[in-house]
Every structure is written in structure tokens, then in C-alpha cells.
Image (spheres, rainbow, N blue to C red):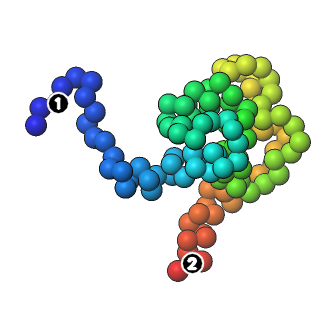
């Protein structure tokens, strides 16, 4: 089948969309904040993420239940994006390996 310029190559089924991690995040976010509307989708989430990056990244920390200490400081320091010296979660401490490997570890515990 020929593909025309600008035409999507693939669109997910409703079942795939409903099971997507992004859909679960949007549902979680709607339950906890009024940052996005009840019918918000990807476009609204994107606009919120670039318009309110501190709130967005704070919600990502919470949604993924990052293991570590968030600290009491700001989400970012050092100036506007993009800039050299910008630091994300500057007062946070965490173990990257613990967070990166925990999903696999937790799945192995369940089996």
C-alpha cells in the first residue's frame, strides 16, 4: 500500500491506547491535580510539560515513585532552559542503579 506524505504509518488500537503507560500517567495526573483537563490527551500534556516544567517533572518523580530523597529544594536551579549549569532536583539524592534495576528485580520477586 502506498504511503502519502504526512500520513501516519501506524495508529494504535483503542486497546493499545487504554493499556499505554502514558494513558495510565494521564489518569493518575487527573486524579491528583487540576493541571490538565478531564479529557486531556497527549497535546495538552505536552503543552503543560513545557509550560510548567517544574510541576511536570515533580509529577513524574511522584508517578514513578522514584526511590531516594527528593529534598526540599526546587525542581530545577541555575537558570532558564536550555542553559549550561541547569540542575534538576538539585537537593535530591538517589541511587541510579537502584531505580533503573528495581522494575526487573520486583518482577523477578513476583515469579
In this view of the protein, can residue 96 be seen by the observer?
no
Left or right of 105? Residue 86 is right
Q: Residues within 10 Å of mark 2 (few under 14, many from 20)?
A: few
Which SS class for mark 1? loop
Which SS class for mark 2? helix
Judging by the rendered image, the residue that carries numbered circle 1 is 3
Q: Is residue 44 above or below residue 32?
A: above
Q: Earlier in the sequence, mark 1 or mark 2?
A: 1
Q: CA distance from mark 1 to mark 2?
A: 44 Å
Q: Is residue 61 above or below residue 104?
A: above
Count of numbered circles on the image: 2
Judging by the rendered image, the residue that carries numbered circle 2 is 110
| Between marks 1 and 2 in the image, the one whose residue lies nearer the viewer | 1
Residue at x 37% of width, y 55% of height:
15
Q: Residue furthest right?
A: 72
In percent of width and height, residue 71 lies at 86, 45
Asked if marks 1 and 2 touch (Cβ < 8 Å), the reply is no
In percent of width and height, residue 61 lies at 70, 47
Q: Residues within 10 Å of mark 1 (few under 14, many from 20)?
A: few
Of 65 and 31, nearer the camera is: 31
Q: Residue furthest front?
A: 38
In percent of width and height, residue 105 lies at 60, 69
Left or right of 33? Residue 107 is left
Left or right of 9? Residue 86 is right
Q: Residue furthest bottom?
A: 111
Residue at x 50% of width, y 37% of height:
41
Left or right of 95? Residue 1 is left
In percent of width and height, residue 56 lies at 67, 36
Residue at x 78% of width, y 54% of height:
68
Image quarter hosting the N terminus: top left
Amino acid at each position: 500500500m502506498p504511503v502519502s506524505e504526512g500520513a501516519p504509518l501506524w495508529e494504535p488500537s483503542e486497546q493499545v491506547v487504554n493499556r499505554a503507560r502514558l494513558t495510565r500517567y494521564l489518569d493518575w495526573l487527573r486524579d491528583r491535580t487540576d493541571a490538565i483537563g478531564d479529557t486531556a490527551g497527549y497535546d495538552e500534556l505536552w503543552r503543560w510539560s513545557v509550560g510548567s516544567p517544574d510541576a511536570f517533572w515533580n509529577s513524574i518523580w511522584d508517578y514513578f515513585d522514584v526511590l531516594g530523597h527528593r529534598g526540599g529544594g526546587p525542581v530545577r536551579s541555575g537558570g532558564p532552559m536550555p542553559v549550561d549549569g541547569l540542575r534538576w532536583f538539585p537537593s535530591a539524592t538517589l541511587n541510579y542503579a537502584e531505580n533503573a534495576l528495581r522494575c526487573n528485580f520486583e518482577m523477578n520477586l513476583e515469579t
